Image (tube, grey):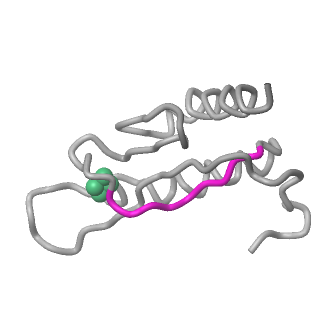
Amino acid sequence: MFEADHIPSEKPLFNVRLCTNKRFNKDELPSCAGRGSKELAHKIEQILLDQSIPAKLIRSPCMNNCRIGPNLKIQRGDLFNEVTEDRLDEIIEAIKAEVTRRKA
Ligand code: FES
């Protein structure tokens, strides 16, 4: 649900999937949510809304790259592994580049 001052200005052109899977079992694999992807999802979503970037963030299930997560995939675009808050500028720029490419 969007707040009134955060209604997207355009229909999303594509999705950006960020794994937010969390493991509760005791296997050896880490999970993206265990490495902070839920907080990253909120931050990315907020940036998309604040900057009126026409892309939709999807909180996805496991993408089968758990050891190098959190993992983020721009639909038909770049794949990012080991996503941290320090890489958000790089990721947002890649999303903007994909918007530009699709509008061309
Ligand atoms: S838990 Fe994120 S890729 Fe597996």
The correct choice, above or below, for 12 with respect to 78 in the image is below
Q: Between residues 13 and 79, which one lies in front from this camera angle?
A: 13
The residue sitting at 44% across, 39% down in the picture is: 84
Q: Quadrant of ligand 1?
A: bottom left
Magenta highlight range = 54-62
- In this rendering, the count of numbered labels is 0
Q: Quadrant of the C terminus?
A: top right
In the image, is residue 58 part of the stretch drawn in magenta? Answer: yes
Q: Is residue 43 left or right of residue 4?
A: left
The image shows residue 14 at horizontal and vertical percentages of 66, 47
Instruction: Report if residue 48 lies within the magenta region.
Output: no
Give the side of residue 67 with respect to residue 28, left or right.
Answer: right
* Quarter placement of the N terminus: bottom right
Q: Nearer the viewer, residue 6 or 85?
A: 6
Relative to 3, is 15 above or below? above
Left or right of 94 on screen, residue 103: right
Residue at image x 51%, y 57%? 39
Please tell me which residue is depicted at 80% across the width and 41% down the height of the picture.
51
- Residue 73: image x %, image y %? 47, 42
Q: Which residue sits at x=90%, y=62%?
A: 5
Q: Main secondary structure of the magenta part?
A: strand
Measured as percent of width and height from the top left, residue 60 is found at 45, 61
Question: In which quarter of the view is residue 25 placed?
Answer: bottom left
- Image coords of residue 33 (percent x, y): 37, 60
